[in-house]
Image (cartoon, rainbow, N blue to C red):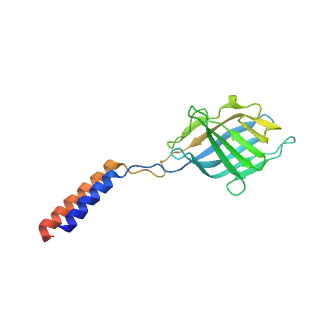
Amino acid sequence: MKLFRVLVLAVFVLGTVSAFADNVTWSLNNVSFNDGATATGSFTYNADTNAVSNWNLTTSSTDAFGGSNYNTGNSSEFTQNLGNPVDSFIFYIGLLQLRFTPVTGLTNAGGNISLDLATAGGGSGGVECYNCSPYRVITSGSLSAEGNANNPVPEPSSLMLMGSGLIGLGAGLRRKFGV
């Protein structure tokens, strides 16, 4: 009888487990600046918690502006909800900043999202800058991610189906062995 109760309790616990999303790695695609430089790399983002981690972004050098590598070990980050909801991403190495804003908010589902080129100017966004003057403006680019396809989230209904099987197994054991 105790085994049966444990199995029933397990089914209810498994059935109430809510699905959660894993972090998603977003990559910069075809990002270029008005001086001919480019930006490449990726960062991990969780839209549920608005948390950024594991960034490694590199900008190329031109005669007017040096290239930089913004990574988790040498820089900090800041995300900002602009109310659309659209998050603006800013990565810092001291006074050096790499800023960009996607046209729509990033989700844990992934996809391909263009960068908002209208946010550039005056160092307000879509730039690489030293304390935002002087700066170079992002003129093209997008972000892309595969979403959670590599780490699928178990659905509560799948867990309930498995739990139902455990109850059936428990009932069979109970009958056979009088547990």
Task: Name the outermost residue toward the right.
Answer: 63
Residue 2 in which image quadrant: bottom left
- Tell me where residue 137 appears, x and y as whole percent: 76, 34
The residue closer to the viewer here, 93 or 139, is 93
Residue 65 in which image quadrant: top right
Residue at image point 68% right, 43% down: 90
- Tell me where residue 31 appears, x and y as whole percent: 70, 39
Give above or below for 76 relative to 133: below
Of the 4 image quadrants, the one containing the C terminus is: bottom left
Q: Is residue 62 left or right of residue 108?
A: right
The residue closer to the viewer here, 108 or 34, is 108
- Tell me where residue 141 appears, x and y as whole percent: 67, 36
Residue at image point 78% right, 41% down: 129
Evaluate whether residue 10 shows in this view. yes
Task: Name the outermost residue toward the top.
Answer: 118
Residue at image point 33% right, 51% down: 16
Q: In this view, does 4 lie to the left or right of 30?
A: left
Q: Is residue 105 left or right of residue 1?
A: right
Residue 125 in which image quadrant: top right
Give above or below for 15 relative to 109: below
- Tell me where residue 52 appears, x and y as whole percent: 60, 49
